[in-house]
Image (cartoon, helix red, strand yellow):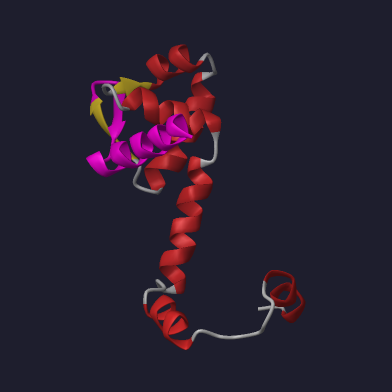
Amino acid sequence: MNEDMCQVSCQVNVIHQKQVMQATENMPGELLVTEAAELFSLLGDNSRLRILRALNTTELCVCDLAAILNISSSAVSHQLRLMRTKGLVRYRKEGKIAYYSLADSYVQDVLSNILEHLKND
């Protein structure tokens, strides 16, 4: 920690060893932190959040999502591809149409919890 920063927020420079050890032991590994940051970055896009919210209701094809979001099919496809590579959505093909859905209930829960948290603030 930057010493100047500590002086701004603390009156004395004391390290609470027990708390530091607890926090250190509970710290996830670098790879997991990096993956989590990438996932949060992915969720930091309005179009992707709206797509996820739409898929929270039912499975939809690219054309359905484009109509709901009022954006191009190619823009929807691009966003879906990004989310599919990170395991947020999956698809199934029926003839020439690919139907997208949330990958699992965890994605639905995370999104619902975030939106509920924001409503309550």
- In the displayed structure image, the side of residue 25 where residue 13 appears, left or right: right
Residue shown at 74% from the left, 76% from the top? 7
Residue shown at 68% from the left, 69% from the top? 9
Q: Image height check: is 90 above or below 61?
A: below
Residue shown at 69% from the left, 77% from the top? 11
Q: Image height check: is 18 above or below 113?
A: below
Q: Does residue 102 belong to the magenta stretch?
A: yes
Q: Image height check: is 108 above or below 75?
A: below
| Quadrant housing residue 91 | top left
Q: Does residue 104 belong to the magenta stretch?
A: yes
Pick the quarter of the image with the N terminus. bottom right
Give the residues drawn in magenta, as a range. Answer: 94-121
Q: Which is more toward the observer, 68 or 119?
A: 119
Q: Which is more toward the observer, 110 or 60?
A: 110
Q: Which is more toward the observer, 40 or 114?
A: 114
Looking at the picture, how far across and down is residue 4, in whole percent?
A: 77, 77
Res 104 visible: no
Residue shown at 30% from the left, 36% from the top? 108
Q: Which is more toward the observer, 77 or 117?
A: 117
Q: Image height check: is 92 above or below 72?
A: below
